[in-house]
Amino acid sequence: MPSIPPEPDSLPAADVALSDQGWADLLSPTRRRLLVTTGLAGAAASATLAAPGASAATTGPANGLFNRGGVLAPIKAPQPGQSPWGYATASQATGQPPGVRPGERTLPQAPRAYTAIQSYHAHIYFDEDSYPKAALLRRWVAERFPVELGDWNLEPRGPHVTPSFYFGFTNELLPIVLPWLQLNSLGLTILLHPNTGDGRADHLYYALWVNRSQPVNAYNWNTSADEAIERIYPNIVPSVPLEV
């Protein structure tokens, strides 16, 4: 540790090397004296400014925001006509902003039938550090489930803002795939969403997340009334029995 130059009333006469605790013990009294001194000066300044008849003659001429001696000067009233915002902004009412999610509908009149779900997608996200985990999880899935496995997406694609891969599966596999992903995600972020014919809602409002969620860039997804529901065509034949 470096040597400490002596100061009156705070250090021993000889140079010493101090530990972290020694520094804390040494500086604490100094900080206390500073706070006490500052507090007394502030109180005196407040009393001076509040005293009847106080003026520049008693407080000293103004120098910027402070009077002589470092005392904060009274703030002058604003001059009309100088601010482009006017002088009534503090009294403005708080209004409701317009919608920032184009295409979002109002509240439905009745619940949507669960039979609208035709299939599911699982999107597994990774980056340059976690791609070995993604490769292992992809192999595990391909060995165990009859799914439709997509390509590697090494860059953001569609509404997905990070590298990813996906696999699609039928409704019958949901009770198995969902808990299996919960237990075997390897800490990766996974988006699981249904396919109902409303791609925007499928990704934003009907989704489930395993581990952390992350942004999905689907707010500008234009939903058409006749949007085709994506069908699943399994391209994987399992080769390893599922652990039970």
Image (tube, helix red, strand yellow):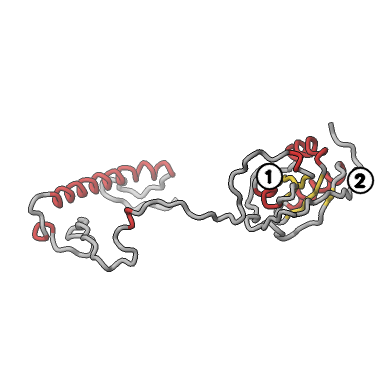
Residue drawn at (86%, 42%) of the image: 145
The outermost residue toward the front is 109
Q: Is residue 215 left or right of residue 171?
A: left
* Quadrant containing the C terminus in the rendered view: top right
| Residue situated in front as seen by the camera: 232 or 71 | 232
Q: Position of residue 65 (x, y in %)?
A: 23, 61
Residue drawn at (31%, 66%) of the image: 83
* Residue position for label 2: 237
* Residue position for label 1: 207
Residue drawn at (90%, 40%) of the image: 240
**Could you tell me the amino acid type at mark 1?**
Ala
Marks 1/2 in contact by CB < 8 Å: the verdict is no
The outermost residue toward the top is 244
Q: CA distance from mark 1 to mark 2?
A: 27 Å
Residue drawn at (79%, 56%) of the image: 152
Q: Quadrant of residue 181?
A: top right
Q: Quadrant of residue 115?
A: top right
Q: Quadrant of residue 100?
A: bottom right
CA neighbours of label 1 inside 10 A, class few (<14), some (14 to 19), many (20+): some
| Residue situated in front as seen by the camera: 205 or 110 | 110
Q: Position of residue 91 (x, y in %)?
A: 32, 53
Q: Is residue 160 left or right of residue 231?
A: left
Q: Position of residue 178 (x, y in %)?
A: 75, 38
Does 21 sit above or below residue 6? above
Viewer-nearest of labels 1 and 2?
Answer: 1
Q: Is residue 184 left or right of residue 91?
A: right
Local SS, label 1: loop
- One can see residue 160 in this view: no
